[in-house]
Amino acid sequence: MQCDYCGNLQSPGIQFCADCGAELISPEQLALLEQANSSGDFVQRIYKHGSSSLFLAGCIMYTIGSVLGILITLSFATIISIWFVIIPVIAAWKIYTVSTGKASVEGILSSLKMFKVITMIPVVLLWIAVGAMAIVAVAFIFIEPIIFVAFVVAILILLVYIIFYFFALFKIINSIRNGIATGHVAKIEGVGAFTILSFIIIGISLLGNIFVLLGIHMMDMIVENMLYYFEDFVGSELMIDLVSDFGGLAVLSSLIGMVTNIGMLLLIITLRKFAMEVRYNLSF
């Protein structure tokens, strides 16, 4: 940019000339220029984190764990619920492919819509469950106070889950959509609550998987000791087969669960890094 008064070259986007102090651009024009620059910047931040190695590793592990989890528990109920696994996987991979090729931002918007639609179904079901439990709790309020208290606690847990997980996820989706539409958001709403509750749920699930693996190992040791002292015990071979079949399936399920949880953890960490960069203008 060249100053019309002194003729010296100035940095683009500044309001006043650094040499003579003359006004180069009006405040209104400067605001429009900053908005135009930030518009592309927000989308570029999405592309940056959506194409990162961390997000790719999360997509791979989440996909492997989810698909294998469906295959080993294939049943009629699994077929009905398969869309709750497949759609998030497709949406995550769509974000990665769009971000890697820096394609049209419409691909990101369609992925966000997929996440929102597939999230609304369990929210509706959970609200129905809360209503049903509330009716049952009222029925036991005078008959059996202990059962009433148990239902109230269960309702509170469900409400916390709905508000701090699903509603927080809706806020995240809406914030990102607004950022794409306007070019700038000061904060990705809902990330804090969603991250904390997700970490708690994933941590409990991982601990459960570890305990299962340790339990199967201890069960194998107990059976081996029993068979050593009761070598001629009738049905010992059947016991070995049952323990082996159960143990093998439990170990496989636990390992698959760990892969899925670690994949989700990596995806959430990527989301957290993106939100921090947007809010504090950091660079990772």
Image (cartoon, helix red, strand yellow):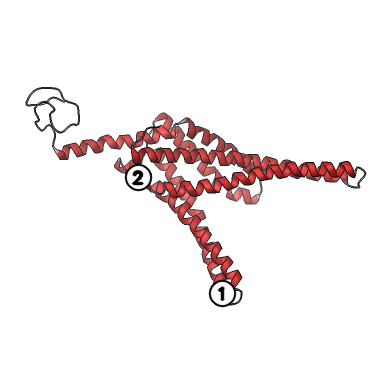
Say whether residue 266 is left or right of residue 45: right
Count of numbered marks: 2
Q: Give percent across and percent down for residue 221.
A: 79, 41
Q: Residue at x 53, y 68 (%)?
A: 134
Tag on residue 141? 1
Q: Is residue 83 visible in the rendered structure shown here?
A: no
Q: Residue furthest left?
A: 5
Q: Is residue 279 visible in the rendered structure shown here?
A: yes
Q: What residue type is labelled 2?
A: Lys
The residue that disc 2 covers is 187
Distance, label 2 to label 1, CA atoms, is 44 Å
Q: Give percent across and percent down for residue 246.
A: 75, 45
Q: Do the residues labelled 2 and 1 touch (CB within 8 Å)?
A: no
Q: Which amino acid does label 1 sit on?
A: Ile
Whether residue 14 is situated above or below residue 83 in the rendered picture:
above
Q: Residue furthest bottom?
A: 142
Say whether residue 247 is left or right of residue 46: right
